[in-house]
Image (spheres, rainbow, N blue to C red):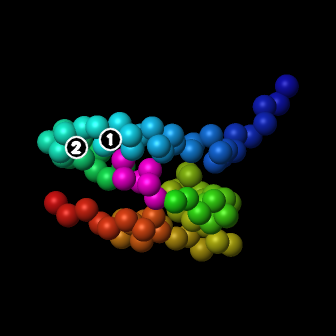
């Protein structure tokens, strides 16, 4: 019996935004700084609205084997700066 091809199911990856931010706000500033040093701004991404139409469209062109977007044979690989612009977050400074 053939298995169906695995596809992205965007609805299942929606994080529990309110719960994450509630926990984050209870932490002391020193704890927040320590965690941010490890995971960066991942927690702050929970407050970033998701453009589901754009995300669904982008996944149609994503080539996971080569980590590029493929538009009729033209491959595009976003830079870190382009990713931060897409998700509307500033580039962290080190």
Tell me if mark 1 has few (under 14), some (14-19) or many (20+) residues whose alpha carbon lies within 10 angstroms of its own: some
**Where residue 43 is drawn, which disc sits there?**
none
| Residue 39 occupies quadrant | top left
Q: What secondary structure is the stretch in magenta mostly built from?
A: helix
Does residue 28 appear anywhere in the picture? yes
- Quadrant location of residue 72? bottom right
Q: Nearer the viewer, residue 72 or 11?
A: 11
Query: Residue lying furthest right in this view?
Result: 1
- Image point (47%, 68%), residue name: 86
Contact, mark 2 vs mark 1 (Cβ under 8 Å): yes
- Left or right: residue 60 versus residue 77 is right
Q: Nearer the viewer, residue 35 or 77?
A: 35
* 30 vs 92, nearest the viewer: 30
Element on which disc 2 rests: helix
Q: Which residues make up the magenta segment?
A: 43-48
Tally the numbered discs.
2
Residue visible at 36% across and 53% down in the picture: 44
Q: Indicate whether residue 10 is drawn in magenta.
A: no
Asked which secondary structure carries label 1, the reply is helix
Which residue matches tag 1? 24
| Quarter containing the N terminus | top right
Give residue 52's position: percent from left, percent from top.
Answer: 63, 59
């Amino acid at each position: 019996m053939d298995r169906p091809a695995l596809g992205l199911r965007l609805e299942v990856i929606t994080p529990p935004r309110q719960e994450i931010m509630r926990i984050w706000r209870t932490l002391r500033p020193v704890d927040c700084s320590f965690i941010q040093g490890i995971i960066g701004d991942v927690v702050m991404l929970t407050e970033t609205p998701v453009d589901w139409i754009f995300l669904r469209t982008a996944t149609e062109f994503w080539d996971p084997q080569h980590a590029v977007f493929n538009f009729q044979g033209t491959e595009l690989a976003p830079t870190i700066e382009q990713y931060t612009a897409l998700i509307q977050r500033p580039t962290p400074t080190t």
